[in-house]
Image: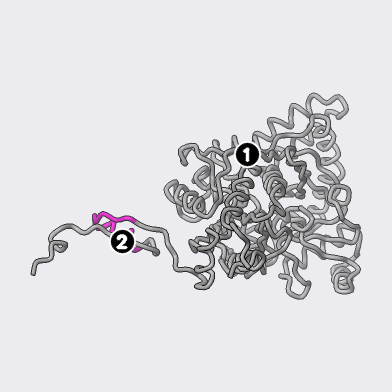
Amino acid sequence: MEYKMFKKAPAVINMGVKPFAEGVKEQGIKTIHVSWRPPADKKLARLIGKVL
Amino acid sequence: MSEPNLKEKIEAANAQAVRELNAAEGHWVGIEKAIKAIPGFKENLILHSGPPIEWDRMIDVQKRGIKYGAIHAGLAKTMEEAEGMVKAGEIEIGSCNDYFAIGAATGIVTHNMVVNVTEDVVHHNKAFCIPFEGRNGLGAWAMWNPEIERNLLEIEDFFAPIVDHVLKKNSGINVRAILAKGMLMGDESHTRQQACGLQLVSEIVPMLLSDPDIAVKDMKHVVEMFVGNERWFHPLGMSCSLASMRCIKGMPYCTIVTTIAQNGVETGIKVADMGERWFTTAAPRFVGTYFSTQWGPDDAVPYMGDSTMTETYGMGAFSAAAAPTVLRLRGGGWKEAKAQSEELKLICAGTNNNFPIPLLDFTGPGMGIDIRKVVESGITPFCHGGIVNKTGGQIGAGGARFPIEHYITATYAFMEKYGVS
């Protein structure tokens, strides 16, 4: 079985901790960083969907 | 039962709030004794920065400021007597923000201190802030010696009456306009206001020079006092922020933060829909630069002061892109400054269009922190500010990432009010 994805240069989507993205980017790999943090409060994360 | 169409009502209220905030226009209209200017002030009242706090929980440096304040106000002769009077309730203490005053650092305001009066001339709301005494002062830095007292008395008894006279005669000075120009000249107007300070001088000096009522020697000394203190403008930027934010206080369904303030123990916020109700949690600590190698994080108190009102109005950390110089305090440059402004925009209901910033492609900074966006994204406000020594005085400057806990409690309170479960 042949996996094509291993034959191409990877592109990375990094979520959360920004230094991880910077480390990958420094190696010349195409990288997109997404500013994201896990919900601080699970119940509120559910409720907030009703008002935002 | 949940309020019908709540989401739409919130969106409409927040959009209206952003329009009102953009219309607000703060002017410096006077400098008067606190007991005259601030509604509800009393001779035995001393204000402090941040949310209200009991004497036993108050940090030592703020207690010291209140005790020195009691002596300056003629309420007590010694520190011991002042402490006894506070404990007995003979001297009352209160939060500056609850009186629409800005508490700079320790935030001490006594009845006989003078306060700058700033008015939003569109909505006719006022806010108050003591003048900047310098790096060694009583009101902000809780320091006292005969030289500080002499300087304070000179501001109160000589400087203030003359400046108040010319301000009233000339219908004040437009602070919002100065802030806007400052944003184009490298100020974010929380930690840095050098450009605004120079503009202020260029507006007030002609007023003084053209006034036949002021003796030449007095005029010369007032100008010397303005020029000799690079941060005269800072209290005006802060009080302009608070005066402007007042127009949305109590606005139904509005989820925008109207106050951020600290007392060195707790940080507190207020939310437009919930009026003057405080939501508090532990105050954050600073990342920044210390003015001398003799000082470090162990010497600093947690965040103290109400200058974070500037961030609620889109200034300070939210306008970092206007002032990359300020980011150097944390080792950053223009890229970090721009990224910080862009990140903080994500948690705002709109932008302050009065302050177009070149590095943001002439868009305004984020303004109107929306508690829903904070808890949904996990991105909390970052605020600039000065670092206060445990023993008084400013020992550095930098910024702090604020906690999320009180945003969560505020959002739960809002949900409960409107029956969302």
The answer to which image quadrant residue B87 occupies is bottom right
The answer to which image quadrant residue B26 occupies is top right
Mark 2: which amino acid? Gly
The percent coordinates of residue B114 (x first, y second) are 83, 48
Residue appearing at x 79%, y 36% in the figure: B221
The answer to which image quadrant residue A38 occupies is bottom left
The C terminus of chain B lies in quadrant = bottom right
Residue appearing at x 68%, y 30% in the figure: B202
Q: Residue B8 colored magenta? A: no
Label 1 packing within 10 angstroms: few (<14), some (14-19), many (20+) = many
Task: Judge whether B357 appears above or below B40 on screen.
Answer: above
Q: Residue A22 colored magenta? A: yes
Looking at the picture, the colour scheme in use is: one colour
Tell me the chain of label 2.
Answer: A
Location of mark 2 (residue): A23
Residue found at the far bottom of this picture: B56
* Residue B275 placement, left or right of B287: right
Task: Judge whether B231 appears above or below A19 on screen.
Answer: above
* Residue B66 placement, left or right of B21: right
Marks 2, 1 in one chain = no
Tell me the chain of label 1.
Answer: B
* Disc on res. B179: 1
Residue B250 in view, yes or no: yes
Give the residues drawn in magenta, as a range. Answer: A20-32
